[in-house]
Image: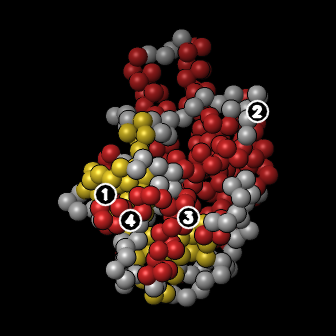
Amino acid sequence: MIKKRQHYVWRKYLTPWTTENKIWCLREGKIFNTGLMNIAQEKYFYEIKKLSKNDILFLQNFVESISSGIIREANLKWVDLFSFVHRFEKMVKKEGSLTEKLEENINQLVKNLNEDSHNFIENQSIDYIEKLLEKDSSFFENEEDRGKFLVYLVAQYLRTKSMRERLLNNAGSTKSINVENCIGALIHISTTTIAFNMFASPDFRTITFLENNTDLEFLTSDQPIINIQAHNTPTNQAPEKLEFYYPISPKLAILVSQDVKDSSIELSEEDVEDYNQKLISFSLEQIFSSSEELLKRYATNK
């Protein structure tokens, strides 16, 4: 089955903000209560586009510039995967062996393959999110689990519409390369590389819980993970450090940071407000809350 509405924020992640499977959303100045199927999604958002020879060469050169060893090999497999479907379609058309059923299967791969790859990352992280909601980060001490969770974390950071637009704006335009067609592969290549670098570094061995016992709840948005260190960094410039902030419920968030090593920090209402404002500044179109009243407070910001 072809998945038409493709979400760039994981629906299961948003459930702590829901009541009876509905969430409050602020979009284009309007506040409304809706189901999770209707938000942070776009028609065929992850559809695999045709890559030209120049596009493939661009991706291969990008891989060579940011990775080596086993990570380079893994990243080159992403290039192969994202170019395979349309290469296969071209081959069978040339041979005259493209049946109606095969064409349907190819179309389903084109529409679903990238979406399915993100679903796989999410599904292997369900247990981690459930443990974090119980303030249990012990899994992060295990190398395999830490690696999988870092892939999940970076993927949720990069996969969004907001991040896609930022990346495309920073990439600029060129006649010989269609960067927009390359973006799906670029996201996975960057996810693999950043997650591995974090895994290999001794600086990312702690998950810090940000406990919110105030009357002000955490918001989330269509960019649910932000790099705090990028807040005051120009959009065309990479921040020097990583400090991922990720609210996981209205009352609990996590930090994965190079600098913060506390296991838990209790926040003041001023701290919560500051994190909410930072999250809003990185959002693109939609802000989410468990409360209509809370969104009214921020409606003038978006």
Identify residue for label 4. 297
On screen, 301 above or below 75?
A: below
Residue sitting nearer the eye, 182 or 72: 182
Q: Nearer the viewer, residue 257 or 64?
A: 257
Q: Earlier in the sequence, mark 2 or mark 3?
A: 2
Report the mark closest to the observer, 4 or 3.
4
On the question of residue 36 being in view, the answer is yes
Query: Could you say which disc has been placed on residue 24 in the image?
Result: 1
Residue 229 lies left or right of residue 104; in this view the side is right
> Residue 33: x percent and y percent?
27, 53
Q: Residue at x 69, y 55 (%)?
A: 235
Label 2 sits on a secondary structure element that is loop
Q: Residue at x 33, y 45 (%)?
A: 38
**Residue 290 placement: quadrant:** bottom left
| Amino acid type shown at disc 3 | Ile
Q: Residue at image x 34%, y 34%?
A: 1
Residue 13 shown left or right of residue 224 in the figure? left
Q: Nearer the viewer, residue 89 or 4?
A: 4
Q: Name the residue tied to disc 2.
A: 174
Frontmost of labels 4 and 1 is 4
Element under label 4? helix
Residue 195 left/right relative to 176: left
